[in-house]
Image (cartoon, grey):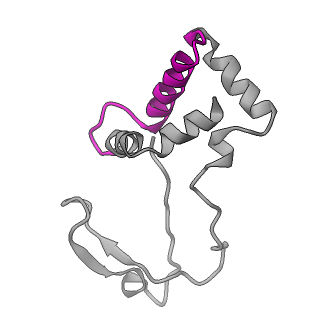
Amino acid sequence: MLKRENELRLSQDVQKRFEEAERSGSKTDWIEVATQVQLEVLREFNVAESSLHAYRCAANKHGLSLYVKYNRAREGSLKVGAPSPDVTLISLKDNGTTRLQSLLDVQKADRPLVIVAGSIT
């Protein structure tokens, strides 16, 4: 079942659903798409949808969780106090199509550069 879930998650259709869910203004997010995929797998294997929690727990118990195994996020190498990498800033007003200046161009020599970042889901 996990292999089938992985096939579905990596399919163009589901990747498109993930992308659409994460767009600003969407009424869903990626976790809802993942849940839909898992429910599709349960139905495909004739397992009751009410078994979703047990399916997830079994996968986690055996170290097979797709949330862990196929997580595309990674821990970066940037550490507190390290020099800031130079990246291009973009405008969020036009879906990121307008490039602004670089991050280091806005840094002031007499002040520390503080970057606050996060993920909103």
Left or right relative to 35: residue 102: left
The number of numbered badges drawn on the structure is 0
Q: Which span is picked out in magenta?
A: 23-49
Quadrant (top left/top right/bottom left/bottom right) for the C terminus: top left
Q: Is residue 121 left or right of residue 41?
A: left
Residue plotted at (26% across, 64% down) = 96
Front residue (pair 20, 107): 20
Tell which residue pokes out farthest to the bottom in this image.
109
Q: Nearer the viewer, residue 79 or 113?
A: 79
Q: Nearer the viewer, residue 51 or 98?
A: 51
Query: Looking at this view, is 19 or 95 the one in front?
Result: 19
Q: Residue 92 sits in which quadrant?
A: bottom left
Q: Is residue 111 above or below residue 97?
A: below
Task: Look at the picture and state if 78 lies above or below 106.
Answer: above
User: Quadrant where the N terminus lies?
Assistant: top right
Residue 16 is situated, as x and y percent measured from the top left of the image, at 34, 44
- Picture coordinates of residue 48, whole percent (x, y): 59, 9
**Image x and y of residue 85, in percent:** 52, 82
33 falls in the magenta region: yes
Query: Residue sitting at 49 percent across and 59 percent down?
Result: 117
Q: Position of residue 95 (x, y in %)?
A: 23, 59
Q: Quadrant of residue 63?
A: top right
Residue 29 on the magenta segment: yes
**Left or right position of 18 against 54:** left
Q: Is residue 97 above or below residue 23?
A: below
Residue shown at the point (57%, 12%) measured from the top left: 46
Quarter assignment of residue 87: bottom left
